[in-house]
Image (cartoon, rainbow, N blue to C red):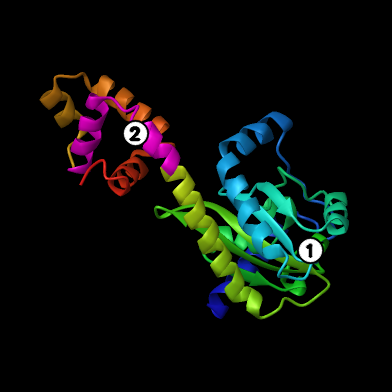
Amino acid sequence: MGDIKSNEILFSYKKCLEIGLTKSIVTPLISLEEEELKRKLQENKKLIEVFRKCVNKVRAQLKKRYIFLLVDSEGYLLDVLCNRKIYKDITDLGIKRGTSFKEESCGTNAISLAMKLKQPIYLKPEEHYCDIFKQWYCIATPFHIDNQIVGYLDISIIEHNMADEMMGFIDLLVYKIANEYKREMDLESQEDLEKLTDKQIEIIKKCAKGYTELAISMELGLKPATVKYYKKEIIKKLRVKNFQQAIAKAIRLNLIN
C-alpha cells in the first residue's frame, strides 16, 4: 500500500504541475455556486444529519482540535465539525461548504487521493502539494453503501501529529455512519415501497431475473419506452442512482428474492 500511495502522490504532483497549479495558493480555487450548493445539501440531507449525530457522540472523547469533514462522492465539502476557533480559522482559508477537494482546486490532499484509490489515505503535512495544507495531518476514507461510494469522511488535525489510534478510529466511525445512514435510508425506502405500483414491482422482479427491457415489454404488453419510464420512477422512489442499486435495495428490503 505504501508504494501505491507514494506513486499516486507523485502522479498527483505531476498533474498539479501540468495544470499550472501554484503551490503557494492559500485558499481552494473551486467552490460550488449558491444554487448548486443548496441542491447538493438537500440531496445529502440525511447523510449530513447522520454524520452530525455520529460525530457529535464521539467528539467529547477526543481532543477538541480534531476537524471532521464530510465530503460528497464528487469531492465537495458538505459539512464541517470542529471547535469554534478552528472553524473560524479554516473558514478564513476558504474551506467551507461547497469547497472542492479535487486536485485542480487545492492540489494533492488526502480526500483527492482517497477518491482516486477508493480506499483510506493518510497524509502528513509535507505530502500535500499546496501551502493550504502544509500544517495538516489528514486521514480520508470512503463511505460504501451497497457497493457504491456515497461520500468521504476526513479527520484532520493542524500542527499536531495524528494520534496512532485515529487510524482505527476513523474506520469504526465510518462503519457507524454508513450503517446508520443505510438504516435511515431503508426506513424511508420501506415507506416508498408502499408507493410502488404492482406493475413497477413486477418490472423490478423481472429485471432482477435478468430480463431485458424488450423481453419485459413483450411479456407485459408494454411499449419499451413505458418500461424505461417505469424503471426511472422506481429509481426515483427508492432514492438510488441507478437500477442496479434499485434491485440491490429491493432485495435487501425483501421486495424480491
Q: Quadrant of residue 3?
A: bottom right
On the rendered structure, is 13 left or right of 204? right
| Residue sitting nearer the eye, 139 or 106 | 139
Mark in the foreground, 1 or 2: 2
| Residue sitting nearer the eye, 42 or 151 | 42
Q: Is residue 196 magenta?
A: yes
Q: Are marks 1 and 2 in contact (CB under 8 Å)?
A: no
Q: Amino acid at mark 2?
A: Leu
The location of residue 179, given as percent across then percent down, is 47, 56
Residue 94 position (above or below residue 17):
above
Question: What residue sits 55% from the left and 57% below the top?
Answer: 177
> What segment is highlighted magenta in the picture?
187-209
On the rendered structure, is 231 left or right of 134? left
Mark drawn on residue 193: 2
Residue 53 position (above or below residue 241):
below
The location of residue 219, given as percent across then percent down, is 11, 26
> Distance from label 1 to label 2 (Cα)?
45 Å
Question: What residue sits 59% from the left and 40% below the top?
Answer: 45
Query: Total of numbered circles in the picture?
Result: 2
The location of residue 172, given as percent across then percent down, is 55, 68
Question: What residue sits 73% from the left and 55% below the top?
Answer: 81
| Residue sitting nearer the eye, 200 or 71 | 200
Q: Residues within 10 Å of mark 2 (few under 14, many from 20)?
A: some
**Mark 1 or mark 2: whose residue is earlier in sequence:** 1
SS for tag 1? helix
Pointer 1 residue: 133
Q: Quadrant of residue 190?
A: top left
